[in-house]
Image (tube, rainbow, N blue to C red):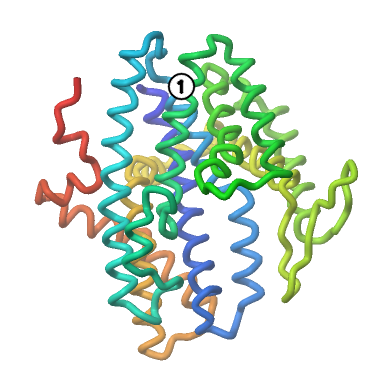
Amino acid sequence: MTERQTWLDSVKGIAIILVVLGHAALGLLLTNKTTSDRQFLTVIHDFIYTFHMPLFFVVSGYLYGLTRRINNWNSYFIFSKKKLLAIGIPYIIFSVIQVTLSIVGGSIVREPLTIRDLVLIPIFPVQYLWFLYVLLFLFLFLALLDRLIKRQLIVFLIVIVLNIVGWYWNSDIYLINALFADSIYFYIGKLLVGRSQLIKKGIFSLGIMILFGVLVIIHFFFNTPLLGIGLLRVSEGSQIFPSIMLSVITAISGSLLIMSISIKFIKSKFIQYLGRESMVIYLLSENVTTLIRAILFKVGITGGIEQFLIGSIVALFGSIVIYKIIAKIKLFDFMFYPTRYLRLR
C-alpha cells in the first residue's frame, strides 16, 4: 500500500498530534488545578475538537475502502474476527489499565473511575477509549451494510439519514448514538478511495479552506440560526458549543482540509512516522500527559500554557519511547498489536 505510506500516514500523523494537544488541554480544564490561561486552553480545546476525531474516522473509512470487498458471509465473518481481535483486545487491556491508574492516581486524573466502570466497558467505554469502542463497531456495522446492500450510494444515504435522526433523538444505548453520529465520517472516508487526486486539486483545497475558516468563525463568534436550527448554544461560563448541524459540517470540511494539505504539502518523514505509530501514541499519551501534569504541579509549574506545551511534547515523544522499550517484550507488544501474534484464517 504505497499510497498509505505517504499522504495517508501524514494525515494520521497530523491527527494524532491534534489528539495529544486536545487531551492535554482537556485534562487541564477538567482537573481545575490551574487557574491561569483557561481561556487559551478553552480556545485550543474547542478548535481541535471540532474535527480531530471525525478526521480519524474518515481515515479509518478510507483504509476500510482499500480492503478487499466483502462479497459473502464467510468473508464478513473473517473480517469481523480480525477487527474484534485487532481493536477489541487493546480496548479491553487498556480499559483495565485506565481504571487501575484512575483508582491509584486519585486526584491527579481528569475523571475518577471505579471497578463498576470496568465491568460496564462492553456497553460504556471509559474516557478516551471510546474511540476504539466506536471504531470497532463502525467496522462491523458498515461492513454488514456493504454485505447486505451492494450500492454504495444507498448505504451513504442510509448513514446520512441516521445522522439526521441522531440530531433529534437520543437513545439510552451509547453505541446506537455513536453509530448514528459517526457512521457518516467513516463512510465518507470509504467513498474517497480512488479520489485522492480530486482532494489534491488546488481549487478544491481553496474551497474547503474557505468553508472551514467561515465555519470556525461562526463557531467562535456568532450565535446565528441556520435553516431554523440554532448553530450555537452558549452555556454557563460562556463556553461555546456548536449544534449538531454545524458540528457535522465543520468536522467534514476540517477533515477534508487536513487530507488535502497532507497530499499537497506534508512530506515530512517524521510526521509520517507519527502516523504509523498513531495507535501507540493514542493508547499511551493520555496517561503520560496525566503523569507529567502531576509532576509539573508538584514542582510548582502551574501555568496553563506551560503545562499544556510541556505535557503535549513529553506525551508525544514519551509515548513512542515507552513503546520502543516495552515492545522488546512480546507480551507488551501484543497489547498494542495482537494480530502480529495471532494466526488468522
The residue beneath circle 1 is 144
Question: Residue 199, located in which quarter of the rendered image?
Answer: top right
Considering the numbered disc 1 on the image, is that residue within a helix, a strand or a loop?
helix
Left or right: residue 110 versus residue 288 is: right
Left or right: residue 60 versus residue 168 is: left
Q: Quadrant of the C terminus?
A: top left
**Is residue 121 depicted above or below 290 in this figure?**
above
In the rendered structure, which amino acid carries the disc numbered 1? Leu
**Is residue 69 depicted above or below 190 in this figure?**
above
Question: Residue 106, located in which quarter of the rendered image?
Answer: bottom left
Question: Residue 43, located in which quarter of the rendered image?
Answer: bottom right
Q: Residue at image x 50%, y 14%? A: 148
Q: Residue at image x 21%, y 48%? A: 335
The one nearer the camera, 224 or 235, is: 235
Q: Residue at image x 49%, y 29%? A: 61
Location of residue 256 in the rendering, given as x and y in whole percent from the top left corner: 62, 35
